[in-house]
Image (spheres, rainbow, N blue to C red):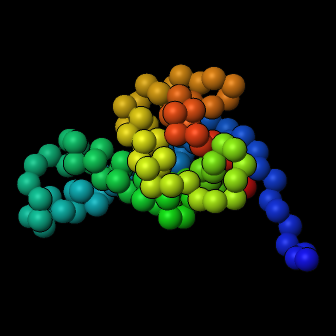
Amino acid sequence: MSNAVTPELREPTWARRILALFVDWVTCLAVVEGLVATGVVAGNPNGLGTLGLFVVESALFTAVAGGSFGKLATRLRVVRYDGSPRPVSLLQALLRQVLVGLLVPPLLTFGGRGLHDLAAGTRTVTL
């Protein structure tokens, strides 16, 4: 039997959620601006490239590490709503992040969970 202590999972504050989103967005914007500046990609760094990178980055990080770069930096995690210890699948993470990219689903909350979390069968928790 292990002596490891399971961390208490709490509902995150809106301030922490917004901070995580800000960290993600600024990071993705910086990467896209760097790619535009070096000529790797053409176009406006404030356009759909940043949104696309945000969706891909956050979905991959969520499936692999339990949260986007911003969520991990602010000690938030995305977990399965059913309480299963398995990580969120890539399909769940991608569905969740596409809905986040649409902006409206995270603002529609039901029982403390956004529409994006309801659709993907996930929830965001604070460690």
- In the image, residue 65 sits, relative to residue 106, either above or below, namely below
- On the question of residue 41 being in view, the answer is yes
Closest to the observer: 106 or 37? Answer: 106
Which quadrant holds the C terminus?
bottom right
Identity of the residue drawn at 46% across and 41% down = 96
Q: Quadrant of the N terminus?
A: bottom right
* Residue 81 quadrant: top right
Whether residue 45 sits left or right of residue 11 in the image: it is left
- Percent position of residue 19, x then y: 54, 45
Position of 107 with respect to 53 (left or right) is right
* In the rendered image, the vertical position of residue 54 relative to residue 37, given as above or below: above
Answer left or right for 86 relative to 100: right
Pick whichever, 117 or 53, lies toward us.
Answer: 117
Please state if 42 lies on the left or on the right of 20 as rendered.
Answer: left
Tell me residue 67's x, y (percent): 54, 56
- Residue drawn at (42%, 42%), measured in percent from left and top? 95
